[in-house]
């Protein structure tokens, strides 16, 4: 009977997210929620000890699970632990407010002042030295007296502008270089980064694009992931976004998530 049960699939619909997922019969409601991308609070990562993954079975039949953490009224309402309740039929599951994340995470200005606005630290003698820089150079036109290759012409100009003498460039950028230089009347911006003792020319852009030099600074936390778009010229943050770390469904802390991933080979962690 168990083998026959596992051979079938069931549809599980989650409210209020209004997401439906198809899972094998016998799967836990928590695994169905993870598959559907629905957050269900589970501090113990499915060990059945925290009691946080409370959901309500509105329609269908779910088996298994302890009821000792629920009152008589909650049992009558259809409460069940998502990590222990198993899908036996098509289900309509409601994730109550205490079990779900409400709204998008908010990033509080000033929580990470070094990322919020590096330009404010200038008065504290803070030196901004990004790994990737942009340098605009005007190259001399080729002539009979100046007939070096385009790459050599660029390296000589960059050497004078940056005070460096050792550069390298990938084949893809080298192939584009002649067209870029000629279309921009030999005025170009080199995007450079350090690779050991060498300075790598990552890209070459036509004209002066030094005003467009940005990076993304990411703060990966156990609960939230915050990304900030930073202007590398002055460290000014010009945009930010945050989302919940999707791994919170696998445990509240790193140790729990390691245990979860080691016990479940296909967990996706």
Image: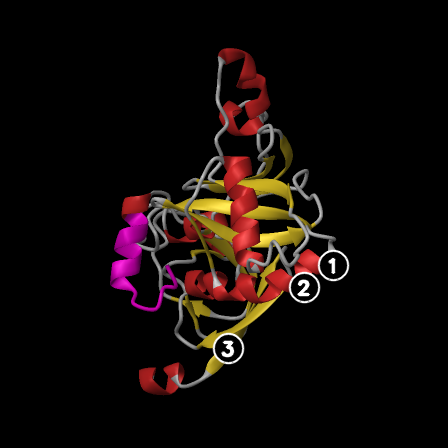
Q: Is residue 60 above or below residue 5?
A: above
> Is the C terminus in the top left, top right, bottom left or bottom right quadrant?
bottom left
> Which residue sits at x=42%, y=64%?
31
> Is the N terminus in the top left, top right, bottom left or bottom right quadrant?
bottom left
Q: Which residue is mark 1?
A: 183
Q: Nearer the viewer, mark 3 or mark 2?
A: 2
Q: Residues within 10 Å of mark 1 (few under 14, many from 20)?
A: few
Mark 3, secondary structure of its residue: strand
How far, Cα to Cα, is label 3 from label 2? 58 Å
Q: Mark 3 or mark 1: which comes first in sequence?
A: 3
> Which residue sits at x=34%, y=68%?
266
Residue 226 seen = no
How far, Cα to Cα, is label 3 from label 1? 60 Å
> Residue 242 is drawn in which quadrant?
top right
Q: Which residue is mark 2?
A: 179
Q: Residue furthest top?
A: 123
Q: Mark 3 or mark 2: which comes first in sequence?
A: 3
Q: Which residues are magenta?
A: 256-269
Question: Of 29 and 223, which appears nearest the observer?
Answer: 223
Q: Which residue is mark 3?
A: 10
């Amino acid at each position: 009977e168990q083998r026959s049960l596992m051979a079938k699939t069931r549809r599980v619909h989650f409210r209020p997210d209004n997401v439906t997922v198809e899972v094998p019969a016998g799967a836990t409601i928590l695994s169905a929620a993870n598959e559907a991308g629905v957050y269900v609070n589970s501090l113990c990562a499915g060990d059945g000890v925290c009691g946080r993954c409370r959901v309500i079975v509105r329609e269908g039949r779910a088996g298994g699970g302890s009821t000792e953490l629920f009152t008589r009224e909650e049992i009558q309402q259809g409460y069940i632990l998502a990590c222990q309740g198993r899908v036996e039929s098509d289900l309509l599951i409601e994730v109550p407010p205490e079990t779900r994340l409400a709204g998008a995470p908010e990033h509080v200005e000033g929580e990470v002042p070094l990322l919020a606005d590096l330009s404010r630290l200038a008065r504290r003698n803070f030196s901004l030295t990004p790994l990737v820089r942009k340098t605009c150079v005007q190259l001399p036109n080729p002539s009979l007296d100046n007939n070096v290759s385009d790459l050599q012409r660029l390296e000589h100009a960059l050497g004078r502008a940056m005070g460096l003498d050792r550069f390298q460039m990938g084949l893809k950028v080298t192939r584009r270089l002649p067209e870029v230089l000629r279309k921009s009347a030999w005025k170009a911006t080199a995007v450079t980064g350090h690779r050991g003792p060498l300075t790598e020319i990552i890209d070459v852009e036509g004209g002066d694009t030094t005003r467009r030099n940005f990076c993304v600074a990411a703060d990966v936390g156990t609960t939230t992931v915050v990304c900030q778009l930073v202007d590398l010229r002055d460290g000014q943050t010009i945009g930010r976004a945050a989302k919940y770390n999707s791994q919170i469904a696998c445990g509240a802390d790193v140790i729990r998530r390691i245990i979860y991933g080691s016990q479940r080979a296909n967990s996706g962690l």
